[in-house]
Image: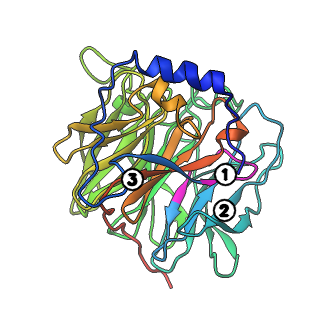
């Protein structure tokens, strides 16, 4: 594998800097009998072109699927691919996404699965949900989205600022519907069981921001959780648009959305992206701006973070660069290294973070 080429002088400089930095933030202690310390970070796999891995989902047999897209300023090198890896991180298959707009290049974002092993991938070019059967390679459109906000300028640098439709995270609910966050329009979609046209399920001025609703998952059958990458300017007194939040919404008996509740607010410039929930209720969160993984307890308290600072991040074999989505694979979490902003091919990787606990089973309906 080809990773960062670091010369000895650079390593000595970084090591010297570490000694001058406070090591707070992570209590790196190993569980009895464990070979790795809690939140230890290793490289699980590298991701081929077009790179920019974001979506990730792990099958029951441990096969890991990773979706790809590309930086908005890069030459168009689509279409997207979904790569399949063995439980040990060996590349075993790839799937080329059909029907993408060649003028926009690669654009796969979030991934999910149903109980039959079919993969559901969010595509941005065009905005849709694709269903992919990895056993046969068959692909079909599962859902579509529409522009509901008045202003949208479809230029790469303006789609978020002008509230264009930008689906980002997805998760099946206990009603077999697919819930999808829209980071641009500041809302949550609901796709009916079996697919079709997405309908607006939840919207609120408090979650409208330059980077809005992102990662999503279910805490239990009645509670949906989602990430707000940057707080909205209309939320809080005074507002903290430099921080981000995990929110929860209860599902009402009639299927409608309940009240928006704050579960956890991050530190400034953390930038929450995706997350995964453990059986214990701990939440493993990717911090896209802070380049770290943090753990939030069921009580909404941060209980661990790694890397603790930017210097520690530079010491990793492959530094975290805009970590995006999180998925459990046994007693570890896999985290995609999105590198959306820097676009460094050496960062196209998936990290393996030791959790020492297993993930909460996801809702995976069967449609066949």
> Which residue matches tag 3?
354
Callout 3 secondary element: strand
Residue 282 position, x and y percent, is 25, 51
Regarding residue 366, the answer to whether it shows in the image is yes
- For marks 1 and 3, the one nearer the N-term is 1
The label nearer to you, 1 versus 3, is: 3
Circle 2: is it few (<14), some (14-19), or many (20+) Cα within 10 Å?
Answer: many
Residue 176 position, x and y percent, is 39, 70
Please give the range of residues in magenta: 45-56
User: What residue do we see at 64% from left, 40% from top?
Assistant: 347
Residue 210 position, x and y percent, is 50, 26
> Which residue matches tag 1?
68
User: What residue do we see at 53% from left, 68% from top?
Assistant: 87
Callout 1 secondary element: loop
Residue 33 vs residue 80, the one in the foreground: 33
The alpha-carbon separation of the residues under discs 2 and 1 comes to: 8 Å
Residue 222 vs residue 299, the one in the foreground: 299
User: What residue do we see at 40% from left, 50% from top?
Assistant: 216
Q: Is residue 332 above or below residue 113?
A: above
Residue 143, magenta (yes or no):
no
The label nearer to you, 2 versus 3, is: 3
Residue 16 vs residue 210, the one in the foreground: 16
Residue 51, magenta (yes or no):
yes
Q: Is residue 32 above or below residue 166?
A: below
Circle 1: is it few (<14), some (14-19), or many (20+) Cα within 10 Å?
Answer: many
Q: Which mark is residue 83?
A: 2
């Amino acid at each position: 594998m080809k990773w960062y080429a670091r010369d000895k002088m650079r390593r000595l400089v970084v090591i010297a800097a570490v000694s001058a930095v406070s090591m707070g933030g992570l209590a790196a202690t190993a569980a009895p009998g464990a070979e790795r310390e809690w939140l230890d970070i290793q490289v699980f796999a590298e991701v081929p072109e077009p790179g920019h891995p974001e979506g990730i989902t792990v099958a029951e047999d441990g096969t890991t699927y990773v979706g790809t897209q590309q930086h908005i300023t890069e030459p168009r090198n689509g279409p997207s691919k979904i790569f399949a890896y063995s439980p040990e991180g060996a590349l075993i298959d790839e799937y080329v996404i059909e029907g993408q707009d060649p003028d926009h290049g690669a654009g796969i974002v979030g991934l999910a699965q149903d109980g039959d092993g079919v993969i559901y991938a969010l595509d941005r070019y065009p905005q849709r949900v694709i269903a992919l059967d990895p056993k046969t390679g068959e692909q079909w459109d599962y859902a579509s989205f529409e522009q509901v906000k008045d202003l949208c300028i479809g230029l790469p640098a303006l789609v978020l600022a002008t509230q264009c439709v930008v689906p980002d995270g997805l998760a099946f609910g206990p009603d077999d519907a697919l819930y999808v966050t829209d980071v641009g329009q500041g809302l949550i979609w609901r796709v009916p069981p079996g697919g079709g046209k997405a309908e607006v399920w939840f919207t609120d001025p408090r979650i409208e921001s330059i980077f809005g609703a992102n990662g999503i998952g279910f805490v239990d059958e009645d509670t949906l959780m989602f990430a707000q990458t940057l707080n909205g300017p209309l939320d809080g007194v005074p507002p903290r648009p430099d921080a981000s939040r995990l929110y929860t919404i209860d599902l009402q008996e009639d299927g409608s959305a309940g009240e928006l509740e704050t579960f956890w607010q991050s530190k400034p410039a953390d930038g929450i992206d995706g997350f995964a929930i453990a059986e214990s209720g701990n939440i493993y969160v990717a911090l896209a701006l802070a380049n770290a993984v943090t753990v939030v307890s069921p009580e909404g308290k941060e209980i661990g973070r790694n890397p603790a600072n930017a210097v520690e991040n530079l010491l990793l074999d492959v530094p975290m660069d805009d970590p995006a989505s999180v998925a459990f694979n046994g007693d570890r979490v896999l985290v995609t290294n999105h590198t959306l902003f820097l676009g460094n091919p050496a960062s196209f990787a998936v990290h393996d973070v030791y959790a020492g606990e297993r993930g909460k089973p996801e809702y995976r309906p069967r449609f066949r």
